[in-house]
Amino acid sequence: RQYLLSLSDSLYTRNEMTSDWLREKIKETEKRLQTSELNYKLQKADLTKVFDRKKESMTDIFEGKIDARRKINAKQDRGFQKIMDEENKIVEALRKENKRLRGENSRLPKQINDVKHSIEDLENANEEIEGHLESLGKFTKKLERDHERLQASNNKCRDE
C-alpha cells in the first residue's frame, strides 16, 4: 500500500507539474497572441498610413495631369472654335452668294429670251433699214441726175 501511495503522490505531483507547465505555456501563448495582435494592429495602422500617403500622392499626380490635360484641351478647343467660326463665316458667305446666284440664274432664261427677241428685232430693223437705204440710194441718184440736169439747164440759161 505504501508503494501505491507513493506512486499516487508521484503521479499527482507529476500531473500538477504538467498542469503548471501547461498553464505557464498557455500564459506565454496568450502573451504572444496579444503581442502578435498588437503588432498586427500597429503594422496595419502603418500600412494604412503608407497607403493613404501613396493614395494622396497619386491623387495629386493624377489631378495635376488631369488639370494639365484640361488646359491643353481648352486651348485646343479655342483653336478649333476659331477655325469653326472662320469656316462658318465662309459657309455663310457661300450660302449668301449661292442665293444671289440662284436668283440671277432664275432670271437668266428670261433675260436670254429677251436678248434673243431684241436681236431678232434688230435684225428685222436692219433689213428694213437696208431696204430704206436702197430706196434712199435710188432717190439720191435720181436727185443727183435731176441736180445735174438743173445745173446743165442753169448753165444753158446763163449762156444764152
Image: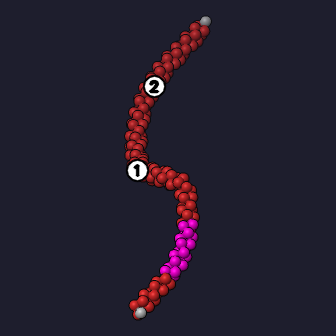
Tell me the amino acid under the disc marked 2.
Glu
Q: Residues within 10 Å of mark 1 (few under 14, many from 20)?
A: few
Instruction: Look at the image and tell me whether residue 154 can be seen.
Output: yes
Answer above or below: position of 36 versus 115: above
- Tell how many labels: 2
* Residue at 45% from the left image edge and 28% from the top image edge: 40
Which residue corresponds to mark 2? 37
Which residue corresponds to mark 1? 82
Q: Could you tell me which quadrant the N terminus lies in? A: top right
Indicate which disc, 1 or 2, sits on the residue closer to the N terminus: 2
Instruction: Look at the image and tell me whether residue 76 can be seen.
Output: no
Q: Quadrant of residue 10?
A: top right
Residue 79 appears at what percent x and percent y? 41, 51
- Real-space Cα distance between discs 1 and 2? 65 Å
In depth, the one of 77 and 146 nearer the eye is: 146
Answer above or below: position of 55 versus 16: below
Residue 115 appears at what percent x and percent y? 54, 61
In depth, the one of 14 and 41 nearer the eye is: 41
Residue 142 appears at what percent x and percent y? 52, 81
Query: Which secondary structure lies at badge 1?
Result: helix
Tell me the amino acid under the disc marked 1.
Lys
* Residue at 39% from the left image edge and 43% from the top image edge: 67
In depth, the one of 126 and 14 nearer the eye is: 126
